[in-house]
Amino acid sequence: MKIILVRHGRPDESDSANPGDPPLNNDGRRQAGAIADLLSLETIDRIVASPLRRARQTAEPLAQRIGRRIDVVDGWAEADRFGARYRSTETLRGLGQEEWKRFLTDPIRYLGGDPDRFQAEVLGALNTIAAEGHATQKVAIFTHGMPINVVLSQALALNGFVHFLPGYGSVTRLRLRSDGGIGIISINESAHHALATPIASTGS
């Protein structure tokens, strides 16, 4: 089975109506369109998304393009899902070196999650997709930075948690092997954004 992990597009951090679960901004919507352009050229058998607005909105253009529903799965949510305000890594870095170091030291706990429980939920969601699918299926999962890191840590058989910063709208491709292992095909693909059509600004 092939798994495509897509990090959501850039959210609108200035959104006051839903600060903890903001929608995409103009750049994020452009990124969502670029992802649809890329993945609609492939045979996508299933679309899965985190329940958070930024992930669902990123999945919508592809779902509309290929005529598939979006299956919302809680296990693919970000560790900050119950936080009061979404903060991008750029915002966190701008809080100063000490605050950035705190984030990098224990990012899941920093965002409000319990690392063991969070990792178990993400891997449980991945295992469920594997059990429900078949060997030739291709599944696109619209999720967040921390779940992508959890899956990559598992794929690399690391004792700890690897942390890197996948770009907004980036694509990471995996292969689920019959022995239960996870093969990595690519990480953090972003070239599709260079061909995307800009969206006119509406002030967000």
Image (spheres, grey):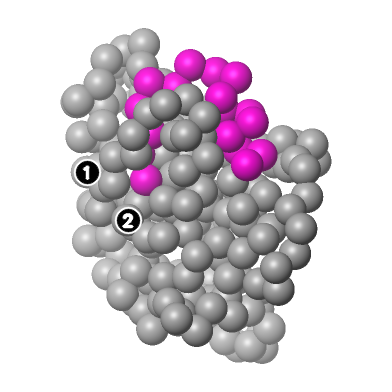
Determine whether, in the image, residue 6 is placed left or right of residue 98.
left
Res. 138 image quadrant: top left
Determine whether, in the image, residue 187 is placed left or right of residue 193.
left
Specify the segment rendered in magenta.
33-49
**Whether residue 171 is situated above or below residue 22 in the rendered picture:** above
**Whether residue 103 is situated above or below residue 167 in the rendered picture:** below
Label 1 secondary element: helix
**Whether residue 8 is situated above or below residue 10 in the rendered picture:** above
> To which residue does mark 2 refer?
51
Q: Position of residue 110 (x, y in %)?
A: 42, 77
- The disc placed on residue 124 is 1
Determine whether, in the image, residue 76 is placed left or right of residue 168.
left
Residue drawn at x 68%, y 83% as measured from the top left? 94
Asked if the stretch drawn in magenta spans residue 55, the answer is no
Q: Position of residue 82 (x, y in %)?
A: 31, 75
The quadrant of the image that shows the N terminus is top left
Q: Position of residue 146 (x, y in %)?
A: 44, 57
Say whether disc 2 or disc 1 marks the residue closer to the N-terminus: 2
- Residue neighbourhood size for the residue with mark 2, other residues' Cα within 10 Å, grouped as few (<14), some (14–19), many (≥20): many
Nearer the observer, 14 or 148: 14
State which mark lies toward you, 2 or 1: 2
- For marks 2 and 1, give the CA distance: 16 Å
Residue drawn at x 58%, y 34% as measured from the top left? 36
- The disc placed on residue 29 is none
